[in-house]
Amino acid sequence: MLSISAIISQITVYFLAALACGAFVRMGFLPLHISCIAGLSAYAFAYLCGEGVYPVLSAFAGVCLSSIAASISGVIFLRVRRGSAALASIGLWFLFDRYVRTAEWTGGSEGLWRKIPCLSSTEKILLSALLVTFCALSYLLFQSTAAERLVTIQGHSPALGKTVIKSNLLMSMFIMNAIAGICAGCSGIIITLQMGFLAPPTFSLQNSILYVSVILVTGYKRVISIAVGSLLFSLLPEVLRICGLGNVEASAWRGVIVGAVILCVILLQIPRSRAASFTK
């Protein structure tokens, strides 16, 4: 059984990662490389702390790196959608996994074990709270900025030229990518603080699938729905352990349950899409 603080950290990680996935899904693709973005922030945070940089500054640098990486990856998906975007995001994850297993500053396949800062429980809570607050303020700023740009486009579209409209949309997408990177980066740092070490399996493709699954089941338009989905997904292994399953069995059955739920959601949406196509 995990401690209360570990459970809260796990729920926070799922929520921030799912929030980042929701921002990417708004642009029309499933971010199966979300673990890469979180991993970049986590590795940068651990490396800088090992070099003697203050943890808060290291966390800020890691979040900035993940935000830049998310913005660059968003440019790749400007002209790629649906299945091609999913394959491209998986390709990015494979590149990240190969890089962290061979790079020297990431510790290679052994990972980073000694560079993680030894913070007290209070310091970890304060740093995690600071990261969550930063994510919340960034998300609210994005909501207001995007809404203002959308009103500008809708209210003055006859007067605006195509270049102005396109620049507003591109800027909104760039901001959305940056906010997604901030949320994913903060989740990666919280994972680092919780686990106390970093290794390539920490940011696996399976974790990306679980984070995206939260959005597939609950949707991405309401923050409350994402929070509830994150709570259920993160607590599901603990519930299975209470039922008598071991750690490996609980993780395996979580995958089975999540897969079955996603399949049911997709099957339930097929009749609606067909009905909508007939009514058009």
Image (cartoon, grey):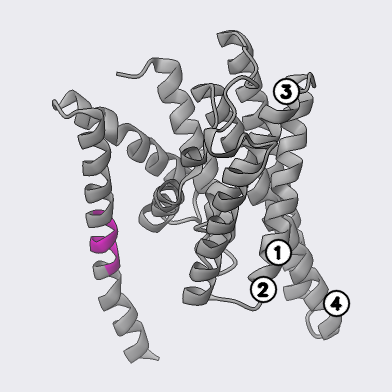
Marked residue nearer the N-terminal end (2 or 1): 2
Marked residue nearer the N-terminal end (4 or 1): 4
Residue 183 visible, this angle: no
Mark 2 and mark 1: span between their CA atoms?
A: 9 Å
Q: Mark 1 and mark 2 in contact (Cβ < 8 Å)?
A: yes
Q: Secondary structure at mark 3?
A: helix
Q: Which residue is mark 3?
A: 49
Q: Residues within 10 Å of mark 1 (few under 14, many from 20)?
A: many
Q: What's under tag 3, amino acid-wise?
A: Cys
Please tell me which residue is depicted at 70% across the width and 38% down the height of the picture.
137
Q: Secondary structure at mark 2?
A: loop
Q: Which residue is mark 4?
A: 164
Between 225 and 94, the one nearer to me in the picture: 94
Residue 238 visible, this angle: yes
Quarter occupied by the N terminus: top left
Mark 4 and mark 2: span between their CA atoms?
A: 17 Å
Quarter occupied by the C terminus: bottom left
Question: Where residue 181 is drawn, which disc sits there?
Answer: none
Q: Secondary structure at mark 4?
A: helix
Magenta stretch, residue numbers: 261-266
Mark 3 and mark 2: span between their CA atoms?
A: 35 Å
Q: Which residue is mark 2?
A: 78
Q: Which residue is mark 1?
A: 173
Q: Secondary structure at mark 1?
A: helix
Give percent across and percent down for residue 164.
Answer: 85, 77
Q: What's under tag 4, amino acid-wise?
A: Val
